[in-house]
Amino acid sequence: MIDLPAIFIANGIGVVLMIILLISNHLNARNVFFDEKLFFHMVVLSLLLCTAEAVSFCLDGQTFPGARVLYLLLNCTLFLLGMAFTFLWTIYVDYKLFEDRRRLSKRYPVLALPVVVVSLLILANLFTPVFFTLSQDNVYSRTPMSALLYVVVGGYLAYTVALVYRSRRKVKRYLFLPVLIFLTPILLGIMLQMAFYGMSFIWVSVSVGLVSLYINIQNEASWVDSLTGLYNRQYLSRFLLSNPERQPSGQLLGGILLDVDSFKEINDTYGHMCGDAALRDVGGLLHSLPLPGGFAARYAGDEFILVQLVDSEEEITAVAQELRQRTEAFNRTHRRPYHLSFSMGCSLWRPGENLDTFLRHMDERMYAEKRAKSLPR
């Protein structure tokens, strides 16, 4: 039995949420970059799907002239738009991770095959029952083949989860995409929709997921340095101001302040674009470091800070040594016109010290190392 009031409320909520996102997008002058365009198209698709689904339920059992044809077309359109949304989401996740459109053009013609096959079957449903049938009284019912739709959608969603959690340590992303937060309401909506025909769960849950994704996008813009992919100074300051010098575990917060050696010469010799590329390389090196209970942040210009929970100063010194080794390996294996190296200062936030003391100790040691490097040998 179809519960029209509940369907209108659920999809109405979805429509309102998507309109709010579209207005917010417009006010923020977004949709300049490829990922923003993908997100905008997903919002529009979700708005259309919520609206079309509500209308389609109104046609169930209606026998006025043209109702059957309209209902058939609307259901096929819903399925096609759903496939398009799922595929757009997959592309969006890949691009947010790798920011490589050439990668998309190579991989996604093959990955699109399931969507293409299912879309052709949906179009075939205009002429013969494949995923659903309409009775003489224009009442909708699913066929056993409808399970294929959920399998394909679920397959793409599972692929994106695997892609993120397999690749996020290889790319410069800290705050990007709490995938489970986005997917949980969607997966719940799919399961409820499969179990209870006559209710509307999927597209309002997608709308909720998109809102959570949008909030995360704003967090990413606020807390992540766009050039290096590391946390920015604002996030670092927030973390340090809320962080006691001794953790409940008894560990101390260790820090490393580092400065890129001869960075001005890189800029002056090779240009600012090459300087930006050097900073991106630094971001990749720092992001690859294992920092249990900690992270790397861009502090200012060519200065960066690493923070990590440690038991002794030797542990944070070992991190600095690991970074030196990785940097030497990077210089050997990557053909860059510049040579990366760092001056570093390590410190522990000891009990009784304030934040300024913690930062000053790192700063003094870093500049002492920089001065030592400049002395004639």
Image (tube, grey):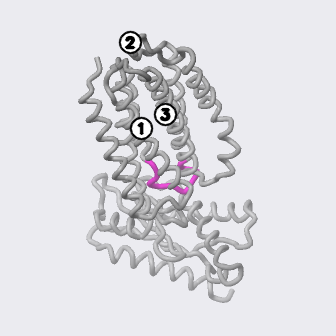
- Residue type at numbered disc 1: Leu
- Asked if residue 339 lies left or right of residue 29, the reply is right
Pointer 1 residue: 183
Which of the 4 image quadrants contains residue 279? bottom right
Which residue appears farthest toward the top when viewing the image? 136
Q: Residues within 10 Å of mark 3 (few under 14, many from 20)?
A: many
- Asked if residue 108 lies left or right of residue 86, the reply is right
Q: Position of residue 283 (x, y in %)?
A: 56, 64
In magenta, the rendered stretch is 168-177
- Residue type at numbered disc 2: Asp
**Gap between marks 3 and 1 measured at Cα:** 15 Å
Pointer 2 residue: 137
Q: Earlier in the sequence, mark 3 or mark 1?
A: 3
Q: Position of residue 53 (x, y in %)?
A: 39, 31
Nearer to me, 151 or 294: 151
Q: Earlier in the sequence, mark 1 or mark 2?
A: 2
The quarter of the picture where the C terminus appears is bottom right
